[in-house]
Amino acid sequence: MCSKCSDYLKFKVLDEYINQQKNSEGCLIAVLHKAQEIYGYLGEEVQQFISNKLNIPISKIYGVITFYSYFTIEPKGKYVISVCTGTACFIRGSKDILEKFKERLNINEGETTEDGLYTLDTLRCVGACGLAPVVTINNKIYGKFDSSEIEKVLNQFKE
């Protein structure tokens, strides 16, 4: 087990999950998904643990993590706000919505508020172009979003 691990119980859960896998190399993505589910992100300590358990170089693990947009190496806020910047949403004002969120939260795209409550991201398309512009909060879709709704939505996700 990881002697320097900051959260022994979480590493124990991850360790048990890895031990259930049959093929070390073939299960990497499944293990990364599970680790991110447990920790919320894939920090260096978690990457090293997975590397040791699966006998896969940490450079390969890092490469997989940074290749797929789903994985993150930075902690995210409790609520991840994503503004769609795909063509339909952009044409219908998503750039203005993004700017208003930045202003209101006092963070830039890809950043998390100091209190750890909100992370602001963009995404290219959620496949709901008929509802453009679209904002998602923790993957829940808010269609035909207007910047005047920002306060209302943020108030729903305060705690």
Image (tube, helix red, strand yellow):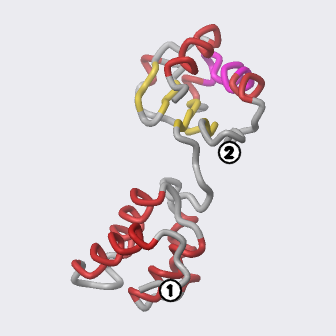
Residue 110 is labelled as 2
Asked whether 85 or 8 is in front, the reply is: 8
The answer, for residue 50, to whether it is visible in the render is: yes
The answer, for residue 121, to whether it is visible in the render is: no
- As measured in the structure, the alpha-carbon distance from the residue carrying label 2 to the one carrying label 1 is 32 Å
Q: Judge the density around disc 1: few (<14), some (14-19), many (≥20) Cα neighbours within 10 Å.
A: few
| First along the sequence among labels 2 and 1 | 1
**Dot 1 corresponds to which residue?**
3
Residues shaded magenta: 90-100
On the image, which quarter does residue 28 sit in? bottom left
Dominant secondary structure of the residues highlighted in magenta in the image: helix
Question: Do tag 2 and tag 1 residues touch (Cβ < 8 Å)?
Answer: no
Image location (x, y in percent) of residue 125: 49, 35
Image location (x, y in percent) of residue 109: 70, 39
User: Looking at the image, which residue is at 50% across and 60% down?
Assistant: 68
Image location (x, y in percent) of residue 133: 54, 19
User: Looking at the image, which residue is at 31% across and 76% down?
Assistant: 27
Asked whether 7 or 67 is in front, the reply is: 7
Image location (x, y in percent) of residue 93: 65, 17
The residue positioned farthest toward the top in the image shown: 148
On the image, which quarter does residue 20 sit in? bottom left
